[in-house]
Image (cartoon, grey):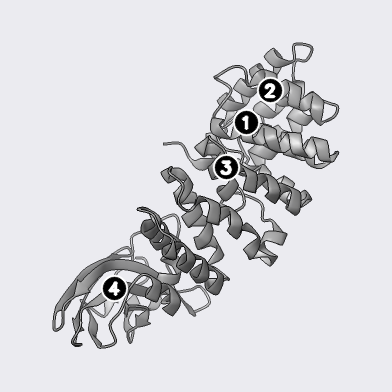
Amino acid sequence: MPFADELLGADEARALVRAIRAARPDTDAPALAQAAESLAPLPLGARADLLRDALLDDVPGDHAALAAVVRRAALDPGFRGWLIWPVTLAVATRAADESEAAFDDGTALLAELTGRLTSEFAIRTLLRADLDRALDHALAWTRAADPAVRRLASEGTRPYLPWAVRVPALLREPQRTIPILDALYRDPDEIVRRSVANHLNDLSRENAELVTETAARWLAEPDATTASVVRHALRTLVKRGDAGALALLGFTGDALEVQGPRLSGAEVPFGGTIGFAGRVRNAGTVAARVAVDYVVFHRRANGSQTSKTFKIAVRDLAPGETLAIERRHSFRAITTRRYYPGAHAIALQVNGVVSEPAAFELLAEA
């Protein structure tokens, strides 16, 4: 499997050069040809930006000129894949700088192209240029026949879309995208519903009340898939132990007894694992639905600690029933986290309530 940066490599760039030459025979696309051989040291986003700028150089003029070339290139069914990313960026860049007519046609062209890879990154340029106009288009996309276009409405307007530039106005006014999500949460296509859940989860970073209010409205008018959409959308709030999210998902039990965690040792070798065990008992007189997670408190470089929550189980416990917990946590080297030797701890989290942490020492690398 290629690294992320390699998704848009020389082969994709050369394919773009050939497509533009075929669609505009009066150019050799020299800027694109040069950019295609200059990608190697660049990360993925910078590669897309370099090819965007080269395409704009090779197709001078206004939005209409660029749109005509792109639409001719798109007559070839092979005009798809990662080469589409810089094409959509170029379209959005030029459309945002011209008239309302260019803005509208550029937005329409992004919808035409999105099924060939995605236009979710490019729409951010138009959202930043004219939020109201771009959101009107996105809301209209929720009624499109093509699920790729409906997904674009939700995914392209996510506040924290991975690999994408931020749209400050969406961070200031998170409620602006709720009408889009309301229109799509019962969508018949799973890729659209998954985007809706991820979008609402993005909003939960800073707007828990908005998210739980929205989820509650959806649960009041559900279809067969609404419960799963809401569970996925509330996953971050559940990990945080948000009371509103837990109540919506039916996690109950006012008489839960938690024992542990008990650790397998006081020290862990660098790259090793630590075991822990615990128990959760429903001491009440009615059944309880419980979400059991564990929290690892990692040492940071400055000596402070940061926490990360990991799921264990969701269970329904009858009165008097006990759930036994036994897990191991690995400290093997991974690319997404750097481990620092010193004081660490593990705690259990049951329905959002965190137990007393059990401390241990991560030893230095030999």
User: In which quadrant of the rendered view does residue 236 lie?
Assistant: bottom left
| Mark sitting on residue 333 | none
**How many neighbours does mark 1 have within 10 angstroms: few (below 14), some (14-19), or many (20 or more)?**
some
Up the image or down, 209 lies above or below 59; here it is below
Rounded to the nearest whole Å, what is the CA distance between mark 2 and mark 1?
A: 9 Å
Rounded to the nearest whole Å, what is the CA distance between mark 3 and mark 4?
A: 39 Å
Q: Which residue is mark 4?
A: 292
Front-lying residue, 255 or 51:
255
Q: Which residue is mark 3?
A: 143
Rounded to the nearest whole Å, what is the CA distance between mark 3 and mark 2?
A: 23 Å
Of callouts 4 and 2, the N-terminal one: 2
Mark 3 touches mark 2? (CB < 8 Å): no
* Residue 162 on image: x %, y %: 56, 52
**How many neighbours does mark 4 have within 10 angstroms: few (below 14), some (14-19), or many (20 or more)?**
many
Q: Which residue is mark 1?
A: 112
Of callouts 4 and 1, the N-terminal one: 1
Of callouts 3 and 4, the N-terminal one: 3
**How many neighbours does mark 3 have within 10 angstroms: few (below 14), some (14-19), or many (20 or more)?**
some
Q: Secondary structure at mark 4?
A: strand
Of callouts 3 and 2, the N-terminal one: 2
Front-lying residue, 101 or 44:
101
Q: Nearer the viewer, mark 3 or mark 2?
A: 3
Q: Is residue 117 left or right of residue 1?
A: right
